[in-house]
Amino acid sequence: MSNNQNSLEVATLGGGCFWCLEAVYVELRGVEKVVSGYAGGHVKNPTYREVCSGSTGHAEVVQVTFDPAVISYADILRVFFTIHDPTTLNRQGADVGTQYRSIILYHDEAQKQTAIEVMQEVTAQRIWQNPLVTELAPLDVFYPAEEYHQNYFARNPMQPYCQVVIAPKVAKFRKQYFDRLRR
């Protein structure tokens, strides 16, 4: 773990339910913190209920604080493109609505450029059969989700959604990125 907070960077990503993304990123070496929340909308301080209604314009996102000396922003994005389906507009599996859209909210021009390059790489590698529909937008405001959403999978592993939806994603991730997991 890095003690120098100034060396840390933040990525803001949405790829369906934020519980799924958080469950994966917390296991990645170089990730210092993951916070579930909302971004990309037009309502101040939205609640989970409001975001789920689809009327606020927000996406469920995670903010991933990471040490770029251990894992690059590009690698954070490469993981992102393998743990959700970036080819389905406003949906992930049974979760449907604009709040579940695939979105990268960049913090600066360097992140925007890296995101463009990684999206081109993912497209060229034909990781997905269909074209990417991932939205690329500047981050305006990030609102942390309610406390009960934080560390959701770790705190509720036996909950049916966690068993059926999140656990298989985490298992696939662990297999694919075994060499990058925290020890």
Image: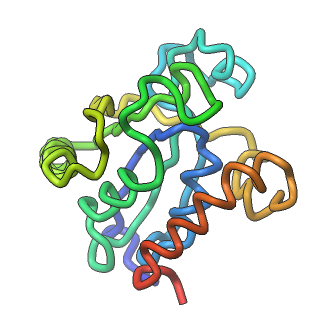
Q: Is residue 115 left or right of residue 34?
A: left
Q: Which residue is depicted at the point 15% across and 42% down?
A: 116
Instruction: Identify the image quadrant of residue 130.
Output: top left
Instruction: Identify the image quadrant of residue 29.
Output: bottom left
132, 72: nearer the viewer: 132
Place of residue 165 in the rendered image (x, y in percent of width and height, measured from the top left): 68, 49
Find the residue positioned furthest to the front. Answer: 129
Place of residue 75 in the rendered image (x, y in percent of width and height, measured from the top left): 29, 64
Place of residue 55 in the rendered image (x, y in percent of width and height, measured from the top left): 59, 9
Relative to 98, say whether 171 is above or below: below
Q: Which residue is depicted at the point 74% across and 22% down?
A: 49
157, 40: nearer the viewer: 157
Find the residue positioned furthest to the bottom. Answer: 183
Q: Which residue is depicted at the point 78% across and 56% down?
A: 163
Q: Is residue 116 left or right of residue 13?
A: left
117, 91: nearer the viewer: 91
Q: Is residue 89 left or right of residue 106?
A: right
Give the quarter of the figure containing the C terminus.
bottom right
Place of residue 47 in the rendered image (x, y in percent of width and height, measured from the top left): 70, 25
Relative to 128, say whether 152 is above or below: below
Relative to 17, say whether 97 is above or below: above
Q: Which residue is depicted at the point 58% across and 35% down?
A: 93
